[in-house]
Image (tube, rainbow, N blue to C red):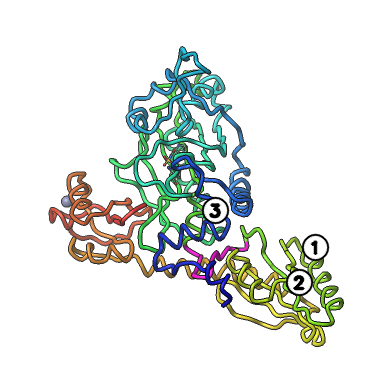
Amino acid sequence: MAEQEKDAALPSKENFSEWYNDLLQKGEIMDVRYPVKGSYVWFPFGFNIRRNVYEIMRKLLDTDHQETLFPLLIPENEFMKEAEHIKGFEEEVYWVTHGGTSPLDVKLALRPTSETAIYPMYKLWVRSHADLPLRLYQIVNTFRYETKHTRPLIRLREITSFKEAHTVHATWDDAAAQVDEAIRIYKEFYRMLAVPVLPSKRPDWDKFPGADYTIATDALMPDGKTLQAGTAHHLGDNFAKTFDIKYEDAEGEQVYAYQTCYGVSERSIAALISIHGDDKGLVLPPSVAPVQVVIIPIIFKESAEVLEACNNVMSMLEDAGIRVKMDASDDRPGAKYYKWEMKGVPVRLELGPRDLKNNAAMLARRDTGEKVQVSLDNIKEEVLSLLDAVQDGLYEKAKDELEARIFECSSLEEAKTKLSEGITKLFWCGEEECGLKLEEDVGAGILGIPTEQDARSGKCPVCGADAKTMVYVARTY
Ligand code: P5A
Ligand code: ZN
């Protein structure tokens, strides 16, 4: 390794926290040097990943949602209407109190989430059952004065990529079905990022402020902690009553509507980077990689021919819709490999004079390091199928890893020893008192009740009573 490359090397992924911070900088995802705590800057490369990630989200939502955009500022009187919601957020709100040097008549909140911005308008928009269901979403920045340790992409004070959907329905059951649909969408979204997620119903003490119930999707990070990577909330008619959102039903009665909301943030990008990356840098799923294939011409003397062949390959791949880049810079091939590995490019294509004589090229996979020689005659098909293989391989590997790190435990003692490795699964009687005691005793949080329950029975490890359900318990971000 050249000196310059040694300096640029990452700490081992074993030291996850250091590795993560260093990777954000060296992989050019985020610059963490911005002088406001909890706010970070997207490098153009990171922003390109973000664009691809949110393009996937938009495609999934646009089938039956509409995109919208609401103001950032929320008047205090609207914000203060829903009691539970206020309780949940009051410590996290940033307030705008002045315009220039003049105090404002009504303080304005920077949205920590947009229920109280959107629902006063829903009151005006929802008139009859024919207006329902109403499904809107926006992708915006939100502000939360987080007091826990802030971390880039994971716990931000300015969340830059808050995708929030807000739906209105005629009945409680319709809203419940929408919550299930939201979780289906999130599972699909994460599938495309090659990130397996575990859905579970949060315990009551951990549901969204103002909701009837919350279902979350959690991802398992390499250090064994889970990351809440998306949540869907059934709001009942709680907000409808507060904001007076009513519709005229088929009998001509004015009745309150039922609502849901669900959100995802750039934690999605934290999860995909953390789960797939390795000691050499980013490993990006082709679905979101800004560069899917990098072509490295191996140039000695016959450079003109090699370059011409590389250009041909590049245009063929571009025509197939592949995001390709050629690195014909003067750097040594080793330095180029190093650079593009750090950037997580899924497939590297090497072509030199000897390959050209054989009418062939070398393909190297970023995820496994495997190399294969392929014929230039069907280069497009070979590359496309290798990109698919990387995409699927990343998901399968992450899924195996997740499954291997869920431990069913029958006692609190056993859970304690397993929590450093991953997620534990325990029986629970369903009593809040036992749940809180369990969390305290094992020093970790109840994620929730798996959305798919098995029929087995067991005993609550805290009180010994018959268990109602199983719960996932994990150390969380
Ligand atoms: C759902 C969308 C809401 O705010 N209102 C509109 C609902 N839910 S939530 O659970 O509070 O947030 C949704 C998701 O946003 C992510 N998230 C964060 N990401 C980065 N930094 C933060 N400080 C932060 N807070 C929440 C989580 O993934 C959460 O599931
Ligand atoms: Zn119990």
Q: Is residue 6 left or right of residue 226?
A: right
Query: Which of the two discs, 1 and 2, labels the residue nearer the N terminus?
Result: 1
Task: Count neighbours of disc 3 (C-alpha within 10 A) and say few if under 14, some if 14 to 19, many if 20 or more.
Answer: many
The part of the image, by quadrant, that contains residue 62 is: top right
Specify the amino acid type for callout 2.
Answer: Lys
Q: Nearer the viewer, mark 3 or mark 1?
A: 1
Indicate which disc residue 380 carries.
Answer: 2
Provide the residue designation for mark 1: 319
Please provide the residue range marked out in magenta. Answer: 275-286
Q: Quadrant of ligand 1?
A: top left
Mark 3 lies on residue: 189
Task: Residue at the far front: name it.
Answer: 3
Q: Main secondary structure of the magenta part?
A: loop
Q: CA distance from mark 2 to mark 3?
A: 27 Å
Q: Nearer the viewer, residue 76 or 6?
A: 6
Which residue is nearer to you in this view: 166 or 6?
6
